[in-house]
Image (cartoon, coloured by chain):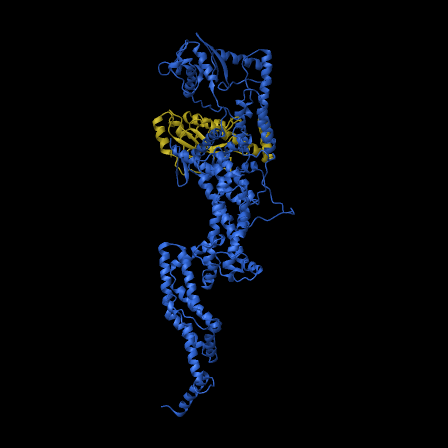
Chain colours: A blue, B yellow
Amino acid sequence: MATDALKRQIAGKWQNSFARLNRDQEGIVGLLVFSEAWTLATEFLHPRDLNDPAANKDWDMSQVRVAVETLSRSKMLPLLLENFLEDMRKQQHLITRDVQQYISQYEEAEDIHHIARLIYRLLEWYRAWVPISELGHTILSAYTLTFQTHVYSILPPSFSRGFKQLVNATFEIGMSPIAPPWLPPTPPALQSLVPAPRPDLPLWGAFEQLGLLDRNESLISSVCYEHIEAHILGTCARRWSERMLQPMREWMTNKIVPWMVMPYARGARSAEEARSMLQGVGSRFDFHVCKTLSDLRTREIFDIIIDFPDSQPALEDLKECLQRVDQRSQLVQTLRKANRKRLLHPGADTKDILTQYVSIIRCLRLVDPPGVLLFKVADPIRRYLRERPDTIRCIVASLVGDGESGDSLVDENEPIQPLQQIQVEDYTDPSWEPEPIDAGPDFRTNKPSDVISTLVSIYDSKDLFVRELQVLLAQRLLAITDGNFDRERRNIEILKIRFGEAALQVCEVMLRDMTESKRIDQHVQSQKNMILHPTIISRHFWPPLQAGKFVMPGQFKQIQDDYAQEFHAFKQDKKLRWLPHLGTIHLEIELQDRTVPADVPPLEAAFIELFSEKDTWTVDELIARVGSVDRPAALKALATWVDMGVVKEGAPNQYILLEVAEDAATHPRPTRMVEEAPAVLTVEQQQADQMKVFWKFIEGMLRNLGTLPLDRIQTMLKFAPNYDRTIEQLGAFMEAARREGMVTVSGGMWKLSRA
Amino acid sequence: MEQLTMSLAPARTSQKSAAAGSGGESAGSVTKRLSSELMTLMMSSSPGISAFPKSDANLFEWAGTIEGAPSTIYAGLTFKISISFPSNYPYAAPIIRFVTPCYHPNVDIVGGAICLDILQDKWSAVYSVQTILLSLQSLLGEPNNASPLNPDAANLWDSPEDFKAQLMKHYRPINDEGSA
């Protein structure tokens, strides 16, 4: 089928090729030269087996160059490249075998030396097969690509792990002056990069030549992240008494940045260039330092607050970190969680909660001056404190400085200032700033106010405090026996500054009562010398006192009456009403064989007075004689005398006076636990009394109006005087009444139970 | 203010015009008086009588409850009444009606109107809700048969069994939806 034209065409092509290979030389000389050159070049390039010493031939490089030159002139280099790559593919099994061998060694021993050796071995292969530079850039990059593609395709997943460990080891290798034995010496070519040769340099060089750096960039940075984390956690954990952020940054500069030069600035020729290359990654690592430190401090925040003020440097670190890292919400969450778990539970003392709350205030002010964090953290604490019955008492106790406890909530150095009201924002203020961006909708700008104002603001009104203050003051005044009220006076003066004159008027009256009592007593004593020194109080201004209605018998009654008479003579328009259960009486009991001196409460004195009438009394007889005393109180009074060996218990409920002392050794005195009943009704007791009044109203409305829903009851209760309960409190009260069987409820409608 | 107007109490006719003239002031003092009466009533715990304002918005309309005194023919029965205070209370008597039908010589069985001297011409400002309720309670046991509103009841009073039968025929026990 071959036509002449086709034949001619083929002949032309052949002629062309021949001319190209023969290069216009005579006969087939050119062809022969080409053939020789091809054979030489392919043989030279042929990937040899490193394990086969015979393959390691010495080549005459000038011959090779000439051969390559010839091939180049014949435009046969692409073909040579193809041929070479084909040969490589055929020889790849040699590498595979080596890789498998090293990896299995590594997997067995988990020793990074094997990984390092593997890398060096791969480098050897790479170097052994690399074509000479005369073949041009194309062939070199094609070779590198093929080589790496093959290597990566055969590396098992365990290599990544090993590589990571190896990179991690470079932190130490780079720092140590001598290289571990499995590392080859630093090649002089790389020494120019850094002033002192570092043992890890060849390793990095190997990494780079094998293309491991580009491929594993994220892995390398994760190694660095982990290294930073480990260092920070190891160095900074629970070290709050000094600033750590700055030392950490210095550590970064001294240790991490030099290391970073290797993976991130290897191509840099000057220090300037290196710096610009490191800038991006460096700031990423700096961010990581801040984040790690702030995470650590966030986790430790509760304990840091406990340690405040010793832990102040840690808080300053945290503040600086938070400016760089946005972890504020995390901090709030962690602290709230810690508070819930460690603080706001029934096991914690109210005083401790308050102390911690105050510390939290101080700490978070330091971290976040605008107070957004504080507001978010404080809210649950405040709500919890509001539910605790003794919160007010604790705050008030610390206000008047209980002295013994020592660690008062109030900083001694803090100036005493009036309570601050919630301020309306002053927009004309030239230094006004808007609310921070993460402030909640109900955030109130918390101007740096003093701690006491913040504590008092837990409650909506300060009246509660004033009432509790009266109770506390009453207790303290009645407890004073030496007539020295200076301390109380000082406290009241301080509190006046805080709460204002008007609120403390009642307290003022109470104080005046005490001094007045002293004055009246002096007068009465001047008229008629008496052993009774009463404290005369104005009933309207004092919180309700425990009502005790017993009558002092015998001589005590006489003394009381005498005194009342003198008093009446002095103050015509006033009458004394005795509170017989308060006070102390100094007695000397004269018995047949001994005299017993004693300082006792009035009830004890009353009983022993009765024993002067007859020697044997039953408890019931004693109670009947003094009037209304409850039995436990009577038994307690008798126990006092039993302990003193003045009376003894004969038959059950019968006590006998011991005119002659019994042998004390026969009945060792048990240590008696005396629980002083407080003389003043607490605010809770007062509230309970008030609730009785409200119950009458509820009863009245339900009786006459039938069934009512809770909210109607709540609004109707406005008829009751001083009704100030919330509907939740009312609901709880009604629920309690239901349990008592006084009311029933169905479908939200309350109804009196049929009596 | 309360004490001031109280001291004017005997001058009854002038009081009425004064009350009409200064409605705002007297309304305030009436409210105060009613509040204090409510307080007294709530705290007194007299057995069998009770009253309370029908709503928190209006202190002038009360609902009351009277139980028949023991050992009277009304023993064990409970009667609801309504009390309506005039704006010049306590210088005029409150208007009181039985809501529960009450078969009684001095009570209108249909309208519940009551014939009691202290609620009419014998009224005095010293009376209070409590005294009225107590009077009504005693009226149940001791009717004034001389001036009956319900002549049938007055005639039957002397035959207790027939009276009781009539009483129970008209009486309706208080049910619970009596919410005002």
Q: Residue furthest top?
A: A592
Residue sitting at x 37%, y 90%: A2
Q: Nearer the viewer, residue A294 or A25?
A: A25
Q: Is residue A564 left or right of residue A628?
A: right
Which image quadrant is residue A368 in?
top right
Q: x, y percentage for residue B35?
A: 52, 32
Q: Is residue A347 visible?
A: yes
The mark tally for this picture is 0
Q: x, y percentage for residue A584?
A: 50, 17
Q: x, y percentage for residue A408?
A: 54, 32
Which image quadrant is residue A594 in?
top left
Q: Is residue B111 visible?
A: no
In which quadrant will I find the N terminus of chain A?
A: bottom left
Q: Residue furthest bottom?
A: A4
Q: Nearer the viewer, residue A271 or B132?
A: A271
Above or below for B50 versus A234: above
Residue sitting at x 65%, y 47%: A430
Residue sitting at x 51%, y 44%: A376
Which image quadrant is residue A78 in?
bottom left
Above or below for A142 versus A449: below
Residue sitting at x 42%, y 30%: B66
Q: x, y percentage for residue A55?
A: 38, 69
